[in-house]
Amino acid sequence: MGVRHAREYKEILDDLTDAVSAIRDSYSFFEMTSEEWGELGDIEKREVMEALADDVFYGLGEESVLHVGQGVVAYKPKFHVIEVMVDDKEARIVRLI
């Protein structure tokens, strides 16, 4: 299936990284503990979140909905967006075109 996009992948990845970073416990996607996460520096945390965003992007090509930490990420092909449900009150939209 794949996630169809017209924007530059780097731009999408930057936006998706910011969005998944806002999800509480998003690091648990990699089976990291809060202690392990807390030991990382800011640069390392950003690198982990970018790797997460990359994995999520390609994962959405196989499954349209993924659970990440306490949030949900969904590919909406009809609207050309990835919707990141950070929590019950906040959603972020990553545009693909």
Image (spheres, rainbow, N blue to C red):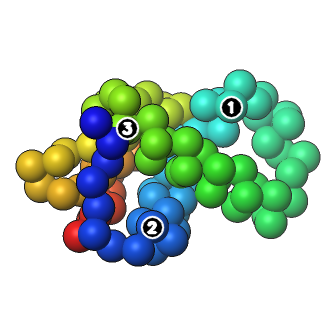
Query: Which amino acid type is shown beneath numbered disc 1?
Result: Phe
Residue at (62, 57) in percent of width and height = 50
Mark nearer the N terminus (3 vs 1): 1
How far is the residue under mark 1 from the one under mark 2?
22 Å
Label annotation for residue 9: 2
Of 90 and 19, the residue lying toward us: 19
Q: Residues within 10 Å of mark 1 (few under 14, many from 20)?
A: few
Image position, residue 5 (x, y; %): 29, 61
Query: Which amino acid type is shown beneath numbered disc 3?
Result: Leu
Label annotation for residue 30: 1
Q: Are marks 3 and 1 in contact (CB under 8 Å)?
A: no
- 1 vs 2, front mark: 2
Residue at (45, 59) in percent of width and height = 16
Query: Which amino acid type is shown beneath numbered disc 2?
Result: Tyr
Residue that mark 3 sits on: 60
Image position, residue 92 (x, y; %): 32, 57
Looking at the image, residue 76 sits to the left or right of residue 18; the answer is left
